[in-house]
Image (cartoon, helix red, strand yellow):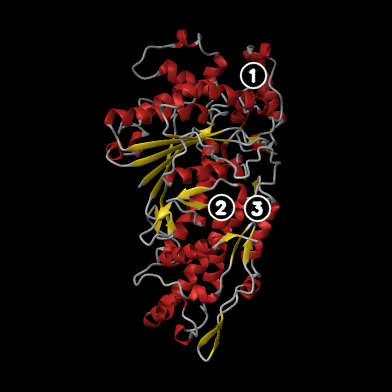
Amino acid sequence: MKNIMIVTGGNGTRVADALVRLLAVGFPTGLDERGQPTSAGDELEIWRIDPDRSSGALTVLNETLRRYRHIQHLMQDGDGEPRVSALADSPWAMAINTQIRDFDPLALPGFDKPISTLRELLAQAPGKRDGTPLLHAFYEDKDLDVKINRGFYQKPFIGSPVIAAFAASLTDRNSPAGSQIDFNTLRQSRIRFFICGSVYGGTGACALPVIGQFLARERQRGNLSWTIGGCLLMPYFLPPPPPFNPLPEDRQADARYVDEEARRMAQQYAAHEAFAVLNDEERIALARQILTGFYADPTDLPLRSRHSLVYYRDILAPTFDELYLIGKPQPDALERWSNGGQTQRNPLNATEVVAAIAALNYFAGNRVGDGRQYGLASGDMTMAAGTLRLCDLPVYLVNGRPVDAEKVFLATAVLVHLLKYQIDWSSDARGWSADPGGLRRLYQLDPARQERDRLAYQTAVDLIRDTMVDMVSPDRTLGWSPDVRAGLDRLVAPGVEQTVIERMKRRTRLLGLATDNTPQDALRFGNTAVELTSFDFYSWMPPPEFKRGDYARLVWAQIFAKAGAGV
């Protein structure tokens, strides 16, 4: 089935990044023909709606997708780096179109170039009468003239007209947005849409209801086979204030004074990270923006969230089939202030991983619309910052079988070990004393494949291992307990392979017969453990015709099935 994830703003983009990482690690959304948990068989497309064309979050997502495409290419029996196809497809994980549909809501039909202010849209729309006299009943001049190419600065009343015009252009094949998608094909397809963004910012707060309503109207008008899910992000981090304060309200109305102050502050803060990447004109514009109050104010986040939810109350219920509300009782404090662009590279947050698991739950076909709570497994809403463990994350179902994050990580960590160290890659397969999965016969018939598979598996599992480590490292992320990374290192860190081998006892033989099939010790990760021997590993047989991803998913599924609560 086709899944389309629509992400709005930087926060939604980071949730998409977390989702791609979870799929790379092995999180399933269904069962294959053998009844094994997998995400392969479905397809994911990512649509991104954000006026910030140089977003740092987008750069990170593109790098994650590049890594995902490399993993999938190797698991599809490819060699080296993938060259052409944007579709990252293999039996290991869900097919993802790595070419993001990156929509600029400021690029609208009838305009020669993307609009830069709200005034351009409302007063100068092609074919429309000049609406400037009417605008002042709803907007101040500063609202109409602020540059919005980095976002809507926690002011959805500025972004809503823009997003409404953008949504209307999606079905126009000649518009900048409509040219990227084929709506006629979408109307004929079964699709799960999942829209994610913040309720306390600007882009997400206005795009979520507008895009959701647009899809709902299209579905109703054409009686389409679409489902629409939504994920509302409540405050889970607090940005620091800008380097200087806004002007008092009475001085903001004095355009000459604002301009003088903007020039002075642009010069004074030219070395600040957010200003240093700009030219002189852009620095003055940013200083003016701060002085007139157009920035993300951390003190306003809770109030803006409540206002958005009150507004959404009567809109979202008839729009979304499934709706998730995700936040953090104690938001994490960020250290660096940014106005967007490449300088806005917030670390991956554990809350974004929770939102990505909500997307997996939705793509797995589960329903939560009956009012059941879907949140931290611990139920502890007073959890302190930096203490979240994988066992605290939501558990979702795949065909009625529970999938918990700690168990997935353990299965994937053990898979990394098995594919790298439990196959005797350095020896000719004809001399192997053991035959893992029937690979000896395969490599005897095609000796060159042994070397190709060795290189491919080692590169792929290293990429998967790095993805796991990146997601839970306290020095690169926010929210996780340091114990998570420490537990993972005991399984997959360089240099621990001999320790793991000793705990997973090798199959011993006496006159060709197994004399002992008891593991030395269970392999543990957090509260989860698996008892496994190399004898078990050698018995897992892939189908006669298989790709690398088939074998990797088979081994993973066997480990996952054996894993359970540790003692």
Residue drawn at point x = 27 percent, y = 40 percent: 188
Q: Position of residue 269 (x, y in %)?
A: 70, 31
Instruction: Give the mark, 1 or 2, whose residue is nearer the N terminus.
Output: 1
Name which residue type carries label 2: Ala
Question: Above or below — where is 415 with respect to 439?
Answer: above
Name which residue type carries label 3: Ser
Question: Above or below — where is 74 with respect to 53?
Answer: below
- Looking at the rendered image, the disc whose residue lies closer to the viewer, 1 or 2, is 2
Name which residue type carries label 1: Asp
| Res. 405 mark | 2
Residue assigned mark 3: 473
| Residue 291 appears anywhere in the view | yes
Residue drawn at point x = 66 percent, y = 59 percent: 487
| Res. 259 mark | 1
Work out which residue is located at the far bottom of the displayed protein and give it: 511
- Label 1 to label 2: alpha-carbon separation: 53 Å
- Label 1 to label 3: alpha-carbon separation: 44 Å
Left or right relative to 241: residue 142: left
Name the quadrant containing residue 127: top left
- Looking at the rendered image, the disc whose residue lies closer to the viewer, 1 or 3, is 3
Instruction: Give the mark, 1 or 3, whose residue is nearer the N terminus.
Output: 1
